[in-house]
Amino acid sequence: MWHCFGRSSDLGYLRKQHVSVSADGVFYLRLLRVKTAEEQGLTLIPDKEDFLTCPLHSLAIALVMQSRALRGSAKPAP
């Protein structure tokens, strides 16, 4: 997303109506830029053969690991 938007402050907002999932499981996301009012789309298609190469699975794992690290639940080794 950095490539598409530059700095994170360029990303305007994300509302529920900007996110949709089709009947076959394709995830659609519309992103709006603040400075130019430009709209860009992101489409994530799940890999039905192997969950390890699925972009939705990878994104979910990254978000879980990030929130876990932010809470400080990892204990340092003695």
Image (cartoon, rainbow, N blue to C red):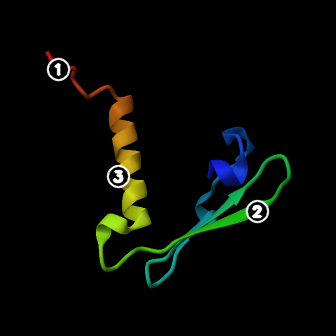
Which residue lies most toward the bottom here?
A: 24
Residue 38 image offset from top left, x and y in percent: 81, 59
Residue 39 image offset from top left, x and y in percent: 76, 62
Residue at image mark 2: 39
Q: Badge 3: how crowded within 10 Å, few (<14), some, or many (20+)?
A: few
Residue at image mark 1: 77
Callout 1: helix, strand or loop?
loop
Residue at image mark 3: 61
Amino acid at the residue labelled 3: Ile
Q: CA distance from mark 3 to mark 1?
A: 23 Å
Callout 2: helix, strand or loop?
strand
Q: CA distance from mark 3 to mark 2?
A: 27 Å
What residue is shown at x 36% (from left), y 62% (from top)? 57
Amino acid at the residue labelled 2: Glu
Disc nearest the viewer among 1 and 2: 1
Indicate which disc, 3 or 2, sits on the residue closer to the N terminus: 2
Amino acid at the residue labelled 1: Ala
Residue 71 image offset from top left, x and y in percent: 34, 29
Q: Badge 1: how crowded within 10 Å, few (<14), some, or many (20+)?
A: few
Which residue lies most toward the top here?
A: 78
What residue is shown at x 49% (from left), y 77% (from top)? 26
Residue 10's tag is none
Q: Nearer the viewer, residue 24 or 44?
A: 44
Q: From this viewpoint, is residue 46 visible?
A: yes
What residue is shown at x 76% (from left), y 52% (from top)? 33
